[in-house]
Image: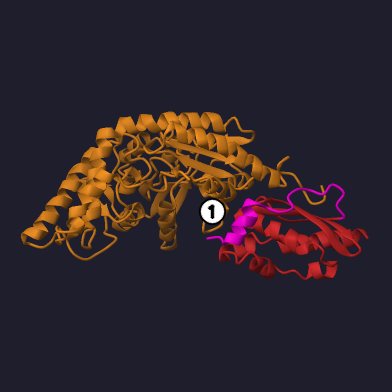
Amino acid sequence: MKQRYFDHIATNPLHPKVLDSMMPYFKEEFGNPLSVYDLGANAKTAIEEARGKVAKLINAKPSEIVFTASGAEANNFALKGIALAKQNEGNHILISKVEHHSVLNPARALEKQGFVVTYMPVDNYGVVDPDTVKKMITDKTILISVTTASSEIGTIEPVKEIAAIANEKNIPFHTDAVAAVGNIPIDVKALGVNLMSMSAHQFYGPKGASALYLKQGQRINPLIYGGIQEGGRRAGTENVPAIVGMGTAAEMAGNELMERYNHVKRLKDRLIKECLKIDNVHLTGHPDNRLPGHASFVVEFIEGEGMLLMLQAKGMYAASGSACTSKALKASPVLTATGISTSMSHGSMVFSLGMDNRDEDMDVLLEEFPQIVNRLREISPFSKGWDAKEGD
Amino acid sequence: MYSKKLMDHFTNPRNVGEIEDADGVGMEGNPTCGDAMKLFIKVKDDKIAEAKFQTFGCGAAIAVSSMITEMAKDKTLDEAMAITKESVAEALDGLPPQKMHCSNLGADALRKAIEDYRSKN
């Protein structure tokens, strides 16, 4: 059966050219970048070239890029690193209610250590109102973090406007741009952000290579102490092949950005239009201002995991934010923040498209998906509405 | 994550639907928690002559529902009352630990259906 992958927000296949660029660093060029002999120098040169390519993708300086092992690490680094560096100036942190777990959970951990976190509400599209940010800033606020785009609902946030407010108050502003970098144009200078997280496997690079953009002069405490790698900001022998792959993937993403954008947007627009023709299916996130390949819905009266398993049986892979598909078995806080009821949140479906998807894949998905919805609704006691009670 | 047997019961669930003139109906769970099961039984000569279900929930919840209708059929009411969550899970060649509690509603729904029948008869 042909495999059709619609979960590019989870991860992406490695681009063959990216893999080719990595191969020498798994084999003959295995040196430690800190070693003084030529084998080490070659590895060091490769890392610095990759740093330059990653910096170029987001219009940063190479020295402003700190490589990490994951997007989650970059987010943890930003939150904990800034909180600790600025703890003598205040203890208040502002984040939104649509943050990824790798922002939400370090914020909760900091709360347990005595920091005060405010979780900013969003509208029904998942958008943070910059005026809310302005109102919630206190004289104790030391960090504001709002995602560039949510992986669950695809909504793109007004990062530039929020950054301007933060800059005016001289508060560091971090944005988790893991779902955005490589998929939409990002310019850190134009946005005015102080810190930004990104991850290579979101743009056809390898897993295990990510980065935190740290604006020149931004003070931060390291998460990992040790040697002088990454200018002392992140110790540990570098994952050279993965970093080289991230560089190649960043260069390709920069060169092909609008081509990729237009490819997935056209398929996504068709997918959203057709899925909304199914009864009691609702779009989640913003209808227009969203990631180009991201189509997310709630399907009433049924549950997400069942849909995923039935899609898988037809060779198709997608995602759901339903409680049953999460290890924690809890309703998605992102969906409930947008005003979706807990009952409805269980019917979450997320299709995220990529360069390997074609019109024919949409044909098959749009043929099968309504049948899957119908089949599960035939099994559901709520197919006539949510109010079915015992003995009806 | 799921056993072959469980996937078979999810993909081809047995005894789906409602029994309009059911002798007993049991509802367990609710849509807020993510799993809800409605079980319908017909009783003849103190035995379960027919069992059907409607379920909202994950793959495990649907497979458990399908399995319990098969296990209940032709059992006396007392025998059916004695079916446990563990025995349903075992019949499906096991459930993932996190699904053992929330999605394993079959035995409780069946007991409620039998109690419903007994309260009327």
Q: Nearer the viewer, residue A174 or B10?
A: B10
Chain letter, red: B
Residue A325: give x, y in percent of width and height.
54, 53
Residue A180 coordinates in the image, percent (x, y): 36, 40
Task: Look at 81% across and 70% down and name the residue there.
Answer: B79
Number of residues whose C-alpha sits closer than 10 Å to that of mark 1, classed few (under 14), some (14–19) or many (20 or more): many
Is residue A3 at all visible to an observer of this figure? Answer: yes
Question: Left or right: where does residue A227 sit relative to residue A155?
Answer: left
The picture quadrant where one finds residue A238 is bottom left
- Magenta segment includes B17: yes
Name the quadrant containing residue A299.
top right
Please provide the residue range marked out in magenta.
B1-23
Q: Colour of chain A?
A: orange
Residue at the far right: name it.
B121
> Above or below — where is A146 with respect to B41?
above
Residue at 40% of width from left, 35% of height from top?
A158
Q: Is residue A25 magenta?
A: no
Q: Amino acid at mark 1?
A: Thr
Q: Is residue B89 left or right of residue A59?
A: right
In this picture, residue A211 sits left or right of residue A154: left
Tell how many labels.
1
**Element under disc 1:** helix
Tell me the chain of label 1.
Answer: A
Does residue A172 appear in the picture of this structure? no
User: Mark 1 = which residue?
Assistant: A325
In percent of width and height, residue A100 lies at 43, 49
A292 vs A189, nearest the viewer: A292
